[in-house]
Amino acid sequence: MPVPEQPLPDQPLNFQYDEDGVAVRVTELPFV
């Protein structure tokens, strides 16, 4: 994933890391 040029806001969208350690954006409750 490309690195964002601007810093993330104080409360960005929820981010989760999958088993591969890749940041995945989730807009709703994360899968448990």
Image (spheres, helix red, strand yellow):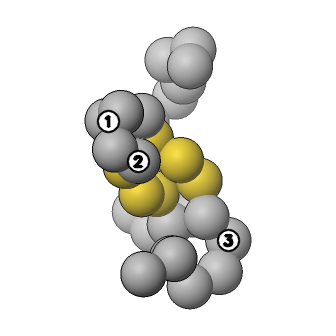
Label 3 Cα crowd, 10 Å radius (few <14 / some 14-19 / many 20+): few
Secondary structure at numbered mark 3: loop
Disc 2/disc 3 C-alpha distance (Å) = 15 Å
Q: Amino acid at mark 2?
A: Asp
Q: Are marks 2 and 1 in contact (CB under 8 Å)?
A: yes
Q: Which residue is mark 3?
A: 27
N-terminal-most mark, 3 or 1: 1
At horizontal 59% and vertical 53% (from top left) the residue drawn is: 25
Q: Are marks 3 and 1 in contact (CB under 8 Å)?
A: no
Quadrant hosting residue 20: top left
Q: Which residue is mark 2?
A: 18
**Quick check: 28 left or right of 3?**
right
At horizontal 56% and vertical 19% (from top left) the residue drawn is: 1
The answer to whether one can see residue 5 in this image is no
Label 1 Cα crowd, 10 Å radius (few <14 / some 14-19 / many 20+): few
Disc 3/disc 1 C-alpha distance (Å) = 18 Å
Q: Position of residue 21 (x, y in %)?
A: 32, 35
Disc 2/disc 1 C-alpha distance (Å) = 5 Å
N-terminal-most mark, 2 or 3: 2
Q: Which residue is mark 1?
A: 21
Q: Position of residue 27 (x, y in %)?
A: 67, 71
At horizontal 49% and vertical 17% (from top left) the residue drawn is: 3
Q: Amino acid at mark 3?
A: Thr
